[in-house]
Amino acid sequence: MLATASDRIWVAPVAVVGAGLLGLGLQWLVFLVLERASVRRGATLRCSVLHRLRASSRLATVSVALDIAVAVVGVHGMLGTALAHGLGIVVVGSVAWALIGLTYVFDDVAKQRYDITAADNLRARRVHTQIQVFRRVAIAGVSFLALGVVLLSFSPIRAIGASLLASAGVAGIVIGLAARPAIGNLIAGIQIAVTQPIKVDDVVVVEGHWGRIEEISLNYVTVRVWDLRRLILPISYFTLQPFENWTRQRADIVGWVHLEVDYSAPVQAIRERFHEILLESSNWDGKAWSLQVTGVGTETMQLRAMMSARDSSASWDLQCEVRERLVDFLRTEHPSALPRLRTEPGTGRS
């Protein structure tokens, strides 16, 4: 009888540990087979799924195996109840973890199929923006549901929830008023993901700052300013306030340079030199250019040199290059064309 009792004492721990190790080994074997098959076929989707679900599936498999072992061995009393409850919470958390990992799978596939660093990256930026916003919405929803399931697994909380059900209307109004900014930002994020007034890597002018959209989250948008500062704006700003988007439909853009010259300036010679500068520059895309007299003043006339470029960065560099080389051309070849202040001597009467 003593030996039998002693054996029973060791049955439960050995069975539980054995079940955990068995589940761990089974998960490792399955993922090893799937990983080798994916490497042979070179599938990005399968490789991403295996990478993102490895840890969560390991935790879920071990938790389920331990839960089955506890039920089979027959651990009763408070210890059995606590173990079952704890393992149930771990299973819920691992499932939520796996679902969140699946949201990153879409991100991995999008990064592999749509290269945002390409020259014509409009479709890539559109897809990346949608996936980024919807991924954050999905993560928030899964986390909220998992937390709710875990909290409802505690009997005292269920009892409190039942007693407060009658006042849920008032509580909902209060919570709605308090969470109005967060809900507004969430709705604005979904609206931006669908209508896409901005996309990741878009060139925008916001609050007088030129920059690129670096990140779109559920609550804010990060704009990387040209001097590497970050402008943080609530996401609802882009649905309520006007702003400039230079790459809304396509990345190419037209830039211009204004010059103040004397009336004696040879416009045709300046136009020919301007065209030569464009042909020599790697920033010009070869699509459009012009040089026109756009205004006259009391002492000078205004020239506008217009040129196209593949994107805003190249356009800025091209404008600076044209401005510098045209001024140097006027200074060396036609110095009289630079603005001058004329004075006429007065005539006196004797």
Image (cartoon, grey):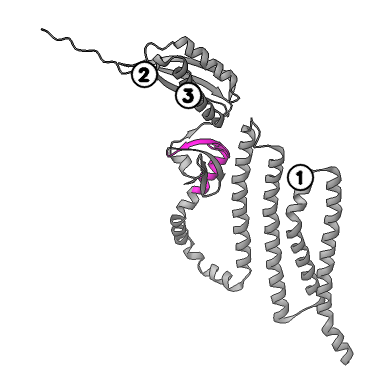
Q: Distance between the residues labelled 2 and 1?
A: 64 Å
Q: Is mark 2 on a helix, strand or loop?
A: loop
Q: Is mark 1 on a helix, strand or loop?
A: helix
Q: Which of marks 2 and 1 is in front?
A: 2
Q: How far apart are marks 3 and 1 (CA)?
A: 50 Å
Amino acid beneath label 3: Arg
Q: Residue 80 lies in magenta, yes or no?
A: no
Please give the range of residues in magenta.
185-207
Q: Does residue 315 lie above or below 236 as drawn?
A: above
At 60% from the left edge and 67% from the top edge, which residue is drawn?
151
Q: Residue 1 at what x, y percent from top left?
A: 88, 92
Q: Residue 308 at what x, y percent from top left?
A: 54, 22
Amino acid beneath label 2: Pro
- Quadrant in the picture for residue 54: bottom right
| Rendered image: mark on residue 45 | 1
Residue 174 appears left or right of 289: left
Q: Which of marks 2 and 1 is nearer the N terminus?
A: 1
Q: What element carries label 3?
A: helix
| Rendered image: mark on residue 323 | 3
Q: Residue 168 at what x, y percent from top left?
A: 49, 62
